[in-house]
Image: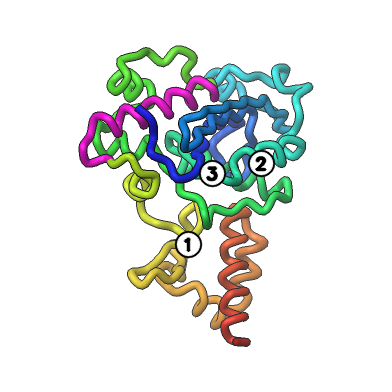
Amino acid sequence: MQLSLTKPICFFDLETTGINITKDRIVEISILKVHPNGKEESKTWLVNPEMPIPKEVIEIHGISDADVADKPTFKKLAKEVYNMIKDSDLGGFNSNRFDIPLLAEEMLRAEIDFDMKNCLSIDVQTIFHKMEQRTLSAAYKFYCDKNLDGAHSAEADTNATYEVLKAQIAKYDEVENNTKFLAEFSSRKKFADFAGFITYNKEGVECFSFGKHKGKLVTEVLEKEPGYFGWLLNADFPLYTKKVLTAIKLKNFNNKLG
């Protein structure tokens, strides 16, 4: 089957040095870009993370320090990667909670103004967990009746994710072949940032989701406690979370001027 698309969608997968979004780095990225007319293009890069890859992580994805020693850093690849995805929605397996947040961090470190405001994200894992409660390898076997050879290589996982999504749409009448529906269906609680530190209340206004100000409006906290903003910017929060906080602060300031 062919996905019903109004714009391209890029399925992607990352292999990394670990699972800490703010500290770990990409060692491999694979992107499969699917166009509304069904045309597909793919690209895979090995990336020098500029830090050692832990032994226990190498045992999972098989990419060693030697494999990436002579490869470009993400900063050198960032523009090429961004140019491939900038006009597209994004799709992946557990991508809303891991791959997209980590990609955003890498982009911002490379001084690329990465933003998801005009981009939908489809998390195939969430659809799978809502419908079947399994893993990617099990999903691939269940939906496509294939064994996932090369699991934990970015390219194999990326291609399998794309095939699983098409099979999910074909299998379930309630799963619509529509990117907006798929993005909403595959989302969990909606956050203003990727990491979940800033959420929306029932009125759609940004609130803190952690700490002493949990549930309070971001704008009200920043007005009553100006030093909190500085603390957040200097603390170990993701760069994208800091970007969102800055945007909220500037928007509130401009609204007052207006």
For residue 88, the mark is 3
The three-letter code of the residue at mark 1 reads: Ile
**Badge 2 element:** helix
- Residue at the farthest left position: 173
Q: Which residue is mark 1?
A: 198
> Mark 2 and mark 3 in contact (Cβ < 8 Å)?
no
Q: Left or right? Give the position of 26 relative to 111.
A: left
The location of residue 193, given as percent across then percent down, is 51, 57
Q: Is residue 246 above or below residue 84?
A: below
Which badge, 1 or 3, comes first in the chain's sequence? 3
- The quarter holding residue 165 reads top left
Q: Residue at x 56, y 41 (%)?
A: 20
Q: Residue at x 64, y 36 (%)?
A: 25
- Front residue of 234 and 80: 80
State the separation of the CA atoms marked 1 and 2: 28 Å
The three-letter code of the residue at mark 2 reads: Asn
Q: Is residue 76 above or below residue 230?
A: above
The location of residue 145, given as percent across then percent down, is 30, 15
